[in-house]
Image: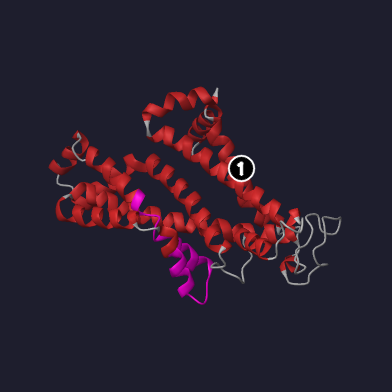
Amino acid sequence: MSPMRLLALARYLKRDRRLAIGLLIVGALALLGPVGQLFVDEAGVRLGAGGFAEAPSAAHPLGTDTTGRDVLAMMVYGTPPTLAIGFLAGLIGTTVGVALGLTAGYYRGPVDVVIRSLADVLLTIPALAVLVVLAALFQTRTVELMAVVVALFAWPWTARAVRAQTLTMREQGFVMIARLSGRSGPGILLFELLPNLIPYVMATFVAAVSGAILAAVGLQLLGLGPITIPTLGLMLQNAFQYAAVVRGMWWWWGPPTLLLIVLFVGLFLISESLDAIANPRLKRPAEAAGR
């Protein structure tokens, strides 16, 4: 990135503090795993690594759970897989939704009817119930499989929103000029329409990531997530399974819950700021909020 673009980005971050704070929060949590693993031994995530149900101490700053696993180690090594599920599911859902939304909005006709009908059907189905059934069907559950399962219901909202934007843009002058110049339909979608939707797509992606992480944690609370890979959802599932709340073991469920809350706040701030970029009517309030 050129110095001029970096300077422009810095000025915008200064003007819109929501985006700056959101990026700082999400960036810090994304670095928690790689940086924390330099100081926290992976052996702490193994059963019996420490004492059983110990309160926070110098040896274990966030205590241990009932099985002797170090809570801090579980958070350090469990945050990256949790983020990976959300970002992978958000990427899949957003990519599919944008592709189908662009196609339906530009070509219209039978293609539009099929895609719109499929999206409408999926939107009326109780997603959590279907996700529970799908997750229960697989004996071996990995981060990638979890992301794919969650992404199955992440694309309809994106497809409908992108379709609506495409219907508006397809009648504008720059698209008509592209048609007259002989550019093909796929070329118009990729080089004319998609670039104008980038801010909107980015905002949709961030919202999809947040929803995917929430859905993944919900499935893991039901015991339907990966059980061999430490994640924040698995920590909460184990805490509720062993009645950590009733037993007063706040250090077991409190830190991962707080970390998820902070993560959702960061993603929300980023999404709100990107919405202001994509929607001109929201730019003025966003700038006022940043001052």
Please name whichever residue, 132 or 4, is drawn nearer the observer in this view of the structure.
132
User: Hey, what amino acid is under mark 1?
Assistant: Ile
Magenta-drawn stretch contains 145: yes
Q: Residue furthest front?
A: 246
Looking at the rendered structure, the secondary structure element under dot 1 is helix
Q: Report x, y in % for residue 36.
A: 71, 55
Q: Report x, y in % for residue 129.
A: 43, 62
Q: Residue furthest bottom?
A: 139
Instruction: Answer with the quarter of the image where residue 167 lies.
Output: top left
Q: How is the image coloured?
A: secondary structure
CA neighbours of label 1 inside 10 A, class few (<14), some (14 to 19), many (20+): some
Q: Is residue 200 at least partly visible in the picture?
A: yes
Residue located beneath label 1 in the image: 25
Please name whichever residue, 173 or 98, is drawn nearer the observer in this view of the structure.
98
Q: Quadrant of the C terminus?
A: top right
Q: Report x, y in % for residue 78.
A: 64, 60
Q: Is residue 192 at least partly visible in the picture?
A: no
**Residue 290 vertical placement versus 98 (above, below):** above
Residue at the (23%, 38%) spot, across then down: 168
Residue at the (38%, 35%) spot, across then down: 278
Residue at the (48%, 75%) spot, across then down: 138
Secondary structure that dominates the magenta span: helix
Residue at the (72%, 67%) spot, across then down: 45
**Residue 133 vertical placement versus 101 (above, below):** below
Q: Report x, y in % for residue 65.
A: 75, 63
Magenta-drawn stretch contains 174: no
Please name whichever residue, 211 or 111, is drawn nearer the observer in this view of the structure.
211
**Magenta-highlighted residues:** 131-157
